[in-house]
Amino acid sequence: MWITRYRRPHPLAWRIVALALIAAATVTASGSGEDGGANPDRGAFVVAGYLPEWRYEGADWDATCAHVTHLILFSMEVTEDAKLTASDRFPHAHLDAIKAASMKHHCELVISIGGNKRTGGFPTVAKDKALTRKLARTLLFFVKQHGLHGVDFNWEYPNGKEEWRGLHRMLKITRRVFDRHRDETGERLTVSTTYYPDGRQEKILADFGAAEHVDMAHAMAYDFGPGGHSTMELAENVIANMERLGLNKSIATLGLPFYGRSKWQSGWRTYEDLASEHPSLGTNGGGDEDPSGEYSFNGLDTIAEKVRLAKTAGLRGVMIWELGQDFHPGDGRSLLGAIAREVWPEGRTKRLVRDEL
Ligand SMILES: *[C@@H]1O[C@H](CO)[C@@H](O)[C@H](O)[C@H]1NC(C)=O
């Protein structure tokens, strides 16, 4: 997920269109969770979607939150003295709308720290216990100040054993600071981390016991190659690796790409662009390649099949990079719409209510 994260907004990127949402998603329940979080259904299957800052302008927050359990705002950075920076990438101007949508749909708001080329401060902070504690307190303060529900660590990637140990300690201390806050207020905040499922990082995370401190570990199951960058076979291997290497599946999510990659060069294109240009791709399950055979992506059928796979395998859920590369979720061609239909076949809220009875 290198190039995809740093491109400027594409002209065809997700615009607000006046489409009706799927009926079930518009029904809402009231009241907050017993643990004080936004999502009263904590044990349920997770749909966690990243939205990078270049998509904030024009985003339909209500429709987005209706289709995800966790909206991950991407991203801010940490400085070498454990302060948060890149505040201009936080959606201050949209916060009221985002929070209203979050409450209405019980969707948790998570701030992501890091990302490729955004991780400069991590090594310095992670090797120092006092700085790590300072960062954890800073994160708690930031999350509370803005009415968010958690933090996502996206260090790409720790280099060497000391840095991995540092990441582990960072997760552990953040969890501890958040737990103390829970004991004082009853509000439980989420901690997640990302990893590249190459068969090596699973083992490191498992050996460190990272699962004890995070609610979710997001497997970035894309950008592999050659050939299709995020095939069904890759998804199966990623899950097999969790089992083989001892990464607790009940905290792992399967990452799903909303973009295609060229098989011949380094280029990539959004699913929305590809399916707009080739209408056949957005209907009847679509396909996983554009007509020229250059771009491989996950079409409607593959996305739905991966969701089923994640459910059957007992994963925590699925993760999406990134929501702004799709059609509006009310559009029949939307990948996020396909995910929601698979996860909540009877509608999201009805299911919540039934689970609560
Ligand atoms: C996996 O994680 C879940 C949720 O945190 C926990 O309940 C379970 O005991 C863990 N399983 C193992 C084998 O550690």
Image (cartoon, helix red, strand yellow):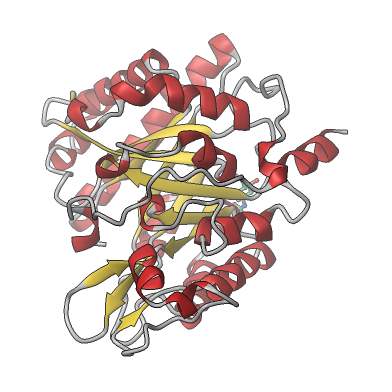
Residue 157 seen anywhere in this rendered image of the structure? no
Residue 300: quarter of image: bottom right
Residue 130 seen anywhere in this rendered image of the structure? yes
- Using the image as rendered, state which of residue 96 and residue 273 is in the foreground: 273
Q: Is residue 156 left or right of residue 309?
A: left
The residue positioned farthest toward the front in the image shown: 18
- Residue at 45% over, 51% down: 217
The image shows residue 314 at horizontal and vertical percentages of: 66, 61
The image shows residue 134 at horizontal and vertical percentages of: 25, 20
Tell me how many marks there are. Answer: 0
- Using the image as rendered, state which of residue 94 and residue 156 is in the foreground: 94
Q: Is residue 340 left or right of residue 237?
A: right
Q: Is residue 8 above or below residue 147?
A: below
Q: Is residue 310 left or right of residue 81?
A: right
- Using the image as rendered, state which of residue 352 and residue 236 is in the foreground: 352
The image shows residue 55 at horizontal and vertical percentages of: 30, 43
Residue 248: quarter of image: bottom right
Q: Is residue 212 above or below residue 76?
A: below
- Residue at 44% over, 57% down: 327
- Residue at 35% over, 15% down: 141
- Residue at 57% over, 18% down: 187
Which of the image's four quarters has the C terminus? top right
Q: Is residue 109 above or below residue 1?
A: above
The image shows residue 227 at horizontal and vertical percentages of: 32, 87
The residue positioned farthest toward the top in the image shown: 184
The residue positioned farthest toward the right in the image shown: 357
Q: Is residue 152 above or below residue 276?
A: above
Which of the image's four quarters has the N terminus? bottom left
